[in-house]
Image (tube, rainbow, N blue to C red):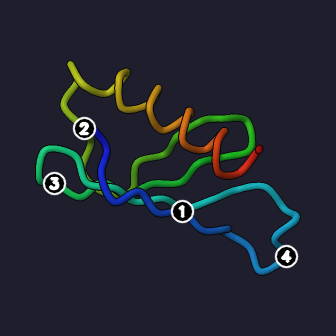
Amino acid sequence: MIQHFQYKSMYENKQLPGWTFSFYYSGLKYEGNYHKNGSIEWTSHLPPADKEEDLKKQLHELMLFHVYE
């Protein structure tokens, strides 16, 4: 489960799409960029291969709720 999720706009002009995010999962901090097309670029270490798809799903849901509401 994702904990302490945070995001912010990549650009000063907040109307431009693109966000940076961070969260904790299993005691490790993950960071990355969420692009306007929904692609995720990890800027910290990569999540475990067996957990990556689940984390991406959770991240998409959080972004839909917080950004696109």
Nearer to the camera, 25 or 69: 69
Residue positioned 84% across, 62% down in the render: 16
Split into 4 quadrants, where in the image is the C terminus?
top right
Q: Which of marks 3 and 2 is in front?
A: 3
In the rendered image, residue 23, in percent from the top left (x then y), is placed at 34, 56
Residue furthest to the bottom in view is 12
| Badge number at residue 13 | 4
Asked if 6 appears above or below 48 in the picture, the reply is: below
| Residue drawn at point x = 37 percent, y = 21 percent | 53
Counting other residues with Cα less than 10 Å from the Cα at mark 4, is it few (<14), some (14-19), or many (20 or more)?
Answer: few
Q: Mark 3 points at which residue?
A: 28
Location of residue 37 with respect to 36 vertically, above or below: above
Which amino acid type is shown beneath numbered disc 4?
Answer: Asn
Q: Residue 7 got which mark? A: 1
Check disc 1 and report its element: helix, strand or loop: strand
Q: How many residues crowd around disc 1 within 10 Å: few (fewer than 14), some, or many (20 or more)?
A: some
Tag 2 residue: 47
Most foreground residue, 34 or 1: 1
How far apart in space, not on screen, are marks 4 and 3 (Cα)?
Answer: 31 Å
